[in-house]
Amino acid sequence: MEAVLPMPPAAAPEPTPGQARRAITLFFLVSGFGFATWASRIPTIQHHLGLNEAELGGVLLAMPAGLMLTLPVTGVLLRRFSSRQVMLAGAILYNLVLALLGQVAHTWQLVALLFCFGSSRNLLNISMNAQSVGVQARYGRSIIASFHGVWSVAGFAAAALGTLLVGRAVGTGPHFAAVAVGLTGLAALSYRHSLALPPSPPTARKPGFAWPDKTLLGFGLVAFASMACEGALYDWSSIYFEKAVLLPKTSATLGFATYMVAMTIGRFSGDWLVNRWGVRRVLLCSGVLIGMGLLLAALLPLPLVAGAGFVLVGLGVSCVIPLLFGMAGRLPGSSSATAVVGVSTVGYFGFLFVPPVVGFIAEVANLRWSFGLMALFGALIVWLVRRLPAVD
């Protein structure tokens, strides 16, 4: 009698493009909501630990340090595992560290946890962007901008929740723990519809920093200036409204919420503006808006005026990076992958290292001086964009 061999288990069905898109959209939501949850309560934690601006600036360096030092580890993991596995692991670690951040009692604990927060955020963000590229390939058209728009919407929602909970005197412990549990559950549910992409081949370029060539350097410097302002407002907008605008602690997070709303609107309207005016004109207007907004907030730190300034900055930074990617990708002899890596490399330094410098300047002078000096980045953007190669 012939032996009957057991049938191998059936492979999981490939998700439809729509299912995969929704799944990765939710991972972008997890990333944005988690980061803005932390950012919206920075003033609370600063008060709790008794940190001045310079001390807080030094503490904030732990996050970029963790993020950058984890880049080689992320590269190794992506060559051994599918990006969906790294993405889920990154999301779980990200939310675990977020929950622990709400319990800090000492400065050294905050430094250690921010290092881990940056590391886990790196794992999550690189892998989910790899997934988003795979999803876009199944559509045959650009949809990546919509993922980043959702990241902004999630950040706004988290900022609004932070404002509400500060007003109700809810501590960071229960706030961060509840958010972490909810986001972890969302990631676990979304994982099954992510793409089972194969690990990166051993010969692939390792994820990490790649310094751009001379042609791309101008694009990278524009990205640096824009992301410096973007990162500074993530970390310092609430503190600015408390220390410079002199709003009560319960209302200080409105500055961050205002900025996030403006940036979200800008990201969802950017394509229409480019089709109407052209990419170069939009970039020039972005630089003007950034410079005017920061100057307005620094010179007239009144609630409505500073809020209007933050709106201008949010609109200004909203579309700079994706538009730079598109322009650089059309350069003769430059592939889109090379352009994105080159522009991101320089821009990344602005996002990671300028926000802590804001704290050091504020301690020597004050936050108004810090924001006023950052307005020079807007002027730098205008000057550089006029000198970029004509690729419209």
Image: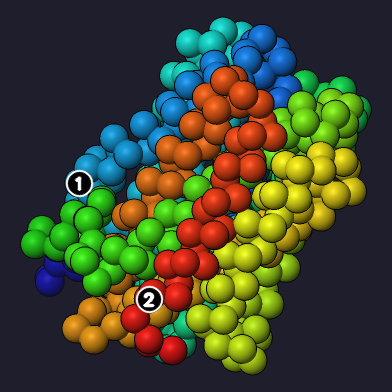
Three-letter residue code for mark 2:
Leu
The answer, for residue 252, to whether it is visible in the render is no
Q: Position of residue 177 (x, y in %)?
A: 67, 29
Which one is closest to the eye, mark 1 or mark 2?
A: 2
Residue at 65% from the left image edge and 84% from the top image edge: 273
- The image shows residue 237, relative to residue 128, as above or below, that is above
Query: In the picture, which quadrant includes the N terminus?
Result: bottom left
Total marks drawn? 2
Q: Position of residue 28 (x, y in %)?
A: 55, 57
**Does 326 sit left or right of 44 as displayed?**
left
What mark, if any, has residue 165 been given in the picture? Answer: none
* Mark 1 secondary-structure assignment: helix
Residue at 69% from the left image edge and 58% from the top image edge: 292
**Does 278 sit left or right of 297 as displayed?**
left
Specify the quadrant of the image occupied by residue 70: top left
In the image shown, does 122 or 183 lie closer to the viewer? 122
The answer, for residue 317, to whether it is visible in the render is yes
Q: Which residue position holds label 2?
A: 388
Q: Which residue position holds label 1?
A: 76
Residue at 25% from the left image edge and 51% from the top image edge: 209
What distance separates the C-alpha of mark 1 from that of mark 2?
Answer: 35 Å
- The image shows residue 96, relative to residue 15, as above or below, that is above
Q: Position of residue 352 (x, y in %)?
A: 44, 41
**Does 207 sit left or right of 43 as displayed?**
left
Bin the neighbour count of mark 1 within 10 Å (Cα to Cα): few under 14, some 14-19, many 20 and up. some
Bin the neighbour count of mark 2 within 10 Å (Cα to Cα): few under 14, some 14-19, many 20 and up. some
Q: Position of residue 247 (x, y in %)?
A: 87, 31
